Amino acid sequence: MKTETSPYSKLRVPFGEKDGRLYRPDAVERGKQCDCHCPECDAKLSVKRSVAGRLFFAHHRAENCLGGYETAIHKMGKQILLDAGRVWLPKRDVTFSFPLVFGETLSETVSFEPREVQFESAVSEKKLDSGFIPDVTAVLKNGAPLYIEILVTHAVGEEKGGAIDNVMEIDLSRLSEETVLDSSELELEVLQRASRWWHRCSLFDELPEVQAAKAALKARVPKEIKRLERKKAAEMQKEEQARLKVERQEAQEKQRELERAPWLGALKRLEYANDFTGWLNMSATMSKRAEPHLASVALRLGFNPRQWPSFLNLPIDQEWVFKEDRRLWQSAVFEQLILANTPGEMLSVPKALAIAEKAAGVRPWALQLSQLKQAHSKRPENQKKAYELRGVWFLDPAENQAIRSPYAVVLSYLKALRKRGLLAEVAQGRSFKVLLSGADIWETHRRQQQSSGTEWSKGSARTFVRLAQNVSQESLQREAEKKQRRKELDEQIELSVIDAQSIAAAGEDSAIFCKSCRRHHVPDPTPDCPVCRSYQIKMVTLTESYLESLAARLRCMP
């Protein structure tokens, strides 16, 4: 295997050969009396002096041969090694490994830095049993063989490098002419400084440090095999769990579709009722159908049907559970439970519901969905959830949230009357107390009618404008207050989520949640909230699903 063309191919011969040794021009007589010949072509040489005063060898009667320079360096390198009886070995990494399981191996490398070795003996160009002839064959002090190749123009081939053990190659192919002509520098390059590398090497394999590292590594094999087996078992278990999870999810989805199928019609009606356009169409139909009945109610209660009392026409969320206009069932509840009673008397929500159902009727599909949700809310898996998150497992969260019972609609109406000062809530969600008499209620309504009468005199016009302005200002103020409450709620929710995430990130798997201020705290033995001192606290588990749905659930809290 040849290297690139040597940069010294046209230079003069640096060393002359005589009696089997190489000499520098200053070590022999001048002229042809030097009695030296060319190491390459064997032609006679003579010692001459250059214009600069440097001595050099030149062919006596023949032209300079092209290989004289390289051959001289090659032979001088071998001569330096034989004369010195020592050399620096290159760095050597000894790597050994042991097979484990699952195609894995356990490996380790022991590195030996460059070091100097002494020769017990050394010869040049000795033919080996394999037929190859190394440049230098040396025996080290410990009896180990060392074969050295000098690279000037021809590198060691793969066949030779792989056939001989402990082969080291020294690269002299790029030495400058100044280095070659300087005896001490050339010797330093050959023995230590020039690049060198191993082709094959077993010199270090039996050293104590290698054997100790190898034994230590071998002792680790059983432990590593067990570790890999545990790891493999864990991976297989994880894969099996993932497979089972997918199977469960597929089975659950299939079961969900199966359970959901009988309710598709009711759910379609639910979607229509919750759509703004759908609800407008439903309201228009119910209002037109209720007109003759509304006139009868107004005549019986004694008020102008064109000025329907606001407390008998209160918009309630999901009021579409009733089949008729809200004014019919609200008037019936008001007439039979408030006007018919005196201040201080009690009324129950179930009784109000019975009156509303009789006056307006309940849509069958809405009642069926409500009963379905209530039945599922009582199941054990739902008891662990917050009330607002309970629902039917095979329905979407939006569908569960849209379903509302007739009881809840009537309760919302009574709570709205409480805010207007007509009622007081006694047992939460169950009973109320009447606060005003019928006369007081109608006097208040009469004054409202007077302030917004239909006689368009100059004074009443000014009164109407003033009331309209007040209403507008109140509306704007309420909207601003509503936005502020939403902003405060968003900030409160953000703080609560940050609390929970921070506690989970700190390694806690549970936290204390305060229902009053909605903040999360590190579990603490004290019975109250450290922020608002409320006793309405509970322990929650900081699962991944809990943290993901926390913001949505906080917004649903009453």
Image (cartoon, rainbow, N blue to C red):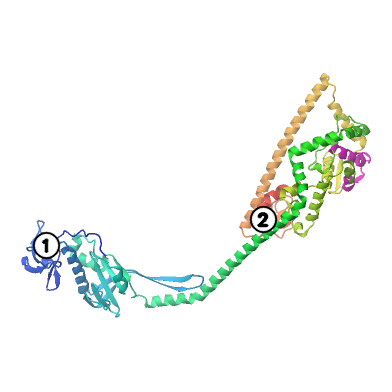
Local secondary structure at mark 1: strand
The residue pinned by badge 2 equals 545
Residues at marks 2 and 1, CA–CA distance in whole angstroms = 90 Å
Q: Is residue 359 above or below residue 72?
A: above
Q: Which quadrant would residue 142 be assigned to in this image?
A: bottom left
- Please report whichever mark, 2 or 1, sits nearer to the chain's N-terminal start: 1
Residue tagged 1 = 56
Q: Indicate yes or no whether the magenta region holds residue 399.
A: no
Magenta-highlighted residues: 325-353
Q: Measuring from the top left, give residue 147's x and y in whole percent.
A: 27, 74
Instruction: Say whether marks 2 and 1 touch (CB < 8 Å).
Output: no
The furthest residue to the bottom: 143
Where does the N terminus fall, quadrant-wise? bottom left
- The quarter holding residue 489 reads top right
Does the image show residue 529? no
Residue under the point 69% across and 59% down: 251
Picture coordinates of residue 153, whole percent (x, y) = 23, 64
**Picture coordinates of residue 288, whole percent (x, y):** 84, 33
- Check disc 1: other Cα within 10 Å, few if <14, some if 14-19, many if 20+: many
| Lateral position of residue 123 relative to residue 101, left or right | left
- Front residue (pair 240, 25): 240
Q: Position of residue 552 (x, y in %)?
A: 69, 49
Amino acid type of the residue that numbered disc 1 sits on in the rendered structure: Phe
Q: Residue at 37% of width from left, 76% of height from top? A: 205
Secondary structure at badge 2 equals helix
Label 2 packing within 10 angstroms: few (<14), some (14-19), many (20+): few
Residue 321: quarter of image:
top right
Mostly what secondary structure, the magenta segment? helix
Q: Is residue 226 left or right of residue 452?
A: left
Left-right relation of 144 to 431: left
Q: Amino acid at mark 2?
A: Ser
